Image (tube, coloured by chain):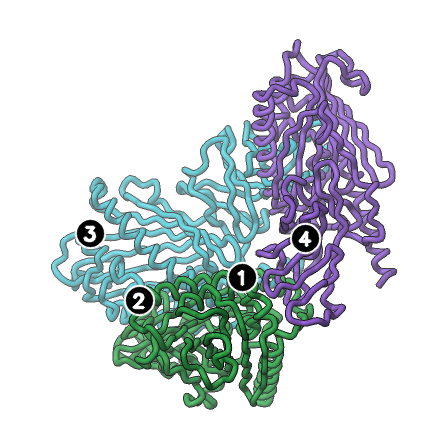
Chain colours: A purple, B cyan, C green
Amino acid sequence: MIMTTQFLRNVWYVAAWAKDLDRGSLISRTVVGEPLAIFRNELGSVGALEDRCGHRGVPFTVGGTCRGDVIQCPYHGFEYAASGECMRIPGQDHIPAAAAIRSYPVVEQDLLIWVWMGDPALADRRQIPSHPYHTDPAWKWTWNELTIKVEWRLLIDNLFDLSHLGFVHRSTIGGDDSDSHMNAGIATRREGDRVYMTRNLTNSVPSPFYAAMTDWSGTIDRWQEVDFVPGLLHIYSGAVDAGEGGTEGSIRSGGVQFHHMHAVTPVDEGTTRYFFSLARSFRLEDDALTQKMDRILRATLDEDVVILEAQQLRYAADPARALLNSRGDAAGVLSRRMVSDLHDAEQKAAAVLA
Amino acid sequence: MIMTTQFLRNVWYVAAWAKDLDRGSLISRTVVGEPLAIFRNELGSVGALEDRCGHRGVPFTVGGTCRGDVIQCPYHGFEYAASGECMRIPGQDHIPAAAAIRSYPVVEQDLLIWVWMGDPALADRRQIPSHPYHTDPAWKWTWNELTIKVEWRLLIDNLFDLSHLGFVHRSTIGGDDSDSHMNAGIATRREGDRVYMTRNLTNSVPSPFYAAMTDWSGTIDRWQEVDFVPGLLHIYSGAVDAGEGGTEGSIRSGGVQFHHMHAVTPVDEGTTRYFFSLARSFRLEDDALTQKMDRILRATLDEDVVILEAQQLRYAADPARALLNSRGDAAGVLSRRMVSDLHDAEQKAAAVLA
Amino acid sequence: MIMTTQFLRNVWYVAAWAKDLDRGSLISRTVVGEPLAIFRNELGSVGALEDRCGHRGVPFTVGGTCRGDVIQCPYHGFEYAASGECMRIPGQDHIPAAAAIRSYPVVEQDLLIWVWMGDPALADRRQIPSHPYHTDPAWKWTWNELTIKVEWRLLIDNLFDLSHLGFVHRSTIGGDDSDSHMNAGIATRREGDRVYMTRNLTNSVPSPFYAAMTDWSGTIDRWQEVDFVPGLLHIYSGAVDAGEGGTEGSIRSGGVQFHHMHAVTPVDEGTTRYFFSLARSFRLEDDALTQKMDRILRATLDEDVVILEAQQLRYAADPARALLNSRGDAAGVLSRRMVSDLHDAEQKAAAVLA
């Protein structure tokens, strides 16, 4: 198979929400093409093994168990430690070295399960992007999780090129004011393995989403600050009444603000798992507002899925055909260049080892 | 991918019924493997663009619009003229030449939308086969449209080798008289890029379809005249009481006659879109007859689909394996030879350009 | 396509139950990748043709007929003898030699339809494994038939490595006593083109299946004798109260015994058709017992299907990756070696002919 995408391996990817892993449970996830059995053992710690028993290749996740600190294959009961070492073969004493399987570094942080798909020696948990808003009582958040039939880089493009809000999301988060989206002031920069974008809309008509948040005097000034490392894209956004300082960056009193998490985990060449949360710092107890936000955000994601899955069909039909970049793609272009640099570096390192 | 079929490009293909294109609408059709956005703009004229925006490759037909005389992409609002020229990029003034996309010649004629997939310089609308019966008040017609999982040439074979009527269509248009079908007098000839066949059945027991048309004295003489150019096959058929001149060609009074249109549009290597109509020149106001014809013809098409899709499975498993030709395949053999000649000529012309 | 499995052709495979072929009927079966039309003609004899008419490649099994001793194609009525010879082409007298199609030796024996996919000159019906229990009134049997998305050799491995009973089939035929399964005494041997295994469990807690058969004093001694030729695996099994001679082989009074048939017919590289029967020699008239056995055996097969189809996914993702063999795989290893030897011999013989 010719690989048409660029998978990065030396990345912390979100594999699951922490809530999806009870003690003693075992779930199946595929990340950058590799099937994983992700578990939380009965002692509470999390881990990941390749989801394929070293004996006859049966996946652990079709009825295998996680008892004590041991993963057991459902077929003939081979038992594995979290390290991938085979600890027991029922019916025989000798355990050949070849029975061992691959394990992957896993960390639980910010109510998320993170997995490292690259060289374990390079796995540094301090590099996991911090998202403290999931556990900070000053913030109230809603979430979503989708598996989208799209190559992961097309989803990153989408999240950076917010000019689509005025077209795809007219009736949800964008509003019927495509000019203000298209004429937004944009600044982008790359710093090492990180890409930043800030985007300011002035005198914008509040979208249905913004209109639901508070009573505005009239038009608003909106800002969006995007911070991307492979695996995760943060967006810090908000709005104030027009002229009240929304474009200044630091002065944001009197309006509303949000912190979004967009974790983008490649599944295979044409599939991406997308973990999303949006935290707000106002009207925390207003359940009607929470539900309304949930509804609008779900509709917003559905709007993207239609576009992205159709785009993927065209992309996959001819991956070599060039895409055209417009002004709105500036940050996407930087991020693709960064991904490409990181991919080259990984390939070179792999070639040295081989 | 190795191409196992022979797609002709310098052909006028039926892409849709005119009725399926309201003003301001945009529909998705794939012809010879290429996805098209076919539209009728708000001024009433029809056109076709490749269904892929020049910006990020999103298809127009997943929510794009056709307003005024402009096609707009649903993702970031790029706008195109019917020529494929990009007229507007929201948020920027400069429109790079690379934003232009391919457009295809389209003509509306005889209540059909015709598209030319080849070299636009060769598109001559006078070459579109005429089928005036769709708009002639002396004829009443019924129609059907099917997408069949079969390579297009197998459908052409089917339409030429009418000896299958006595087997596949015993209970519909063929009748339980396979001998008369098999012993029919057949004459075939090729004239340039056209293949003709005439076929006469004498003393044939009326099939259920013919029996429903009128009161026959006993057996009948039936004729079928087939006229094929790539993209379209006409059949002029009819019957008179046996001995009343049905085999003479020109004397056809006292019986019934039909003009069929069979537009055969290749979708991809294993899929064909089939547009069918059958016009009659008698009992025009008899709605019960119209409904009965509709029922029988729909059943007839369903009988063909079962055979053709099963045949395709065997064909696709080994496309190189030879088919055997029998007496009934004479016209099919001529038509395949003509298709092959035309295909060679197109390949040669393309090689000269390259 | 690169073949990843090893199909044996000089084998008698079970293609169907005899009961599935009424006189004059025609059914579709695929064996080692080749589509067959299996029929019983109106005179009562069975046969198999390649399921593809020599004319235009249409399968006989989409509406073709078997009248008298002739198979007729549904498309244009070509007629074939059981030998594959074309006997009639409607509408023409000349029958070209190229119209003939392949026929396959077929035998009806023990209420099964057996087909030989290899060189017809080598087809010796005396080599068909005998299974007299289907017609012996001293035995009462139940049966099942499944199409499983698994490579056929993985199913043979499963049937030989009965140590999985203590894990996969805890609640059905294995029981919750995996130690006795894992520590079973096993003896294996290959004799020419046949592999045997005997397996004895002593002091084993009766599984739910065994518990339903009779009133045991306490633990039981169980035996399983497996006899494999490609195409069919017999298992002779049973149990007696612990210490009553169950491990001696010949002394089996006072307990229960079963004769199983497991016919394993490769369909394609990733699909296998599995014909199963289990005969008992006790409580023959006890319908409630029969129904209970049926229920437990069906549940047992379903347990295997989940494991096998998941295993196939991992196997197909990387067929070259080695499987690990444990003590329980001894007979499976012998059988794979035998299959590989037979496959090499067939390939060599084919190369000599070519």
Q: CA distance from mark 4 to mark 2?
A: 44 Å
Q: CA distance from mark 2 to mark 1?
A: 62 Å
Of the residues tagged 2 and 3, which is closer to the observer? Answer: 2
Q: Could you tell whether A290 is left or right of C206 in the image?
A: right
Instruction: Identify the residue position indicated by label 2 in the image.
Output: C287
Instruction: Identify the residue position indicated by label 3 in the image.
Output: B213
- Rendered image quadrant of residue C93: bottom left
Q: CA distance from mark 4 to mark 3?
A: 80 Å
Q: Secondary structure at mark 1?
A: loop
Q: Secondary structure at mark 2?
A: helix
The amino acid type of the residue labelled 4 equals Gly
Whether labels 4 and 2 share one chain:
no
- Rendered image quadrant of residue A239: top right
| Quadrant location, the N terminus of chain A | bottom right
Q: Could you tell whether C290 is left or right of B316 in the image?
A: left
The amino acid type of the residue labelled 1 equals Gln
Up-down relation of residue A149 to residue A57 (above or below): above
Judge whether residue B36 can be spotted in this image: yes
The amino acid type of the residue labelled 2 equals Asp
Q: Could you tell whether A156 is left or right of B242 in the image?
A: right
Instruction: Say which chain tag 2 marks.
Output: C
Q: CA distance from mark 2 to mark 3?
A: 60 Å
Whether labels 3 and 1 share one chain:
yes
Instruction: Identify the residue position indicated by label 1 in the image.
Output: B6
**Residue drawn where x is 52% and y is 81% of the image:** C247
Q: Position of residue A73 (x, y in %)?
A: 63, 60
- Give residue A225's mark: none
Whether labels 2 and 1 share one chain:
no
Whether labels 4 and 3 share one chain:
no
Q: Secondary structure at mark 3?
A: loop
Q: CA distance from mark 3 to mark 1?
A: 39 Å
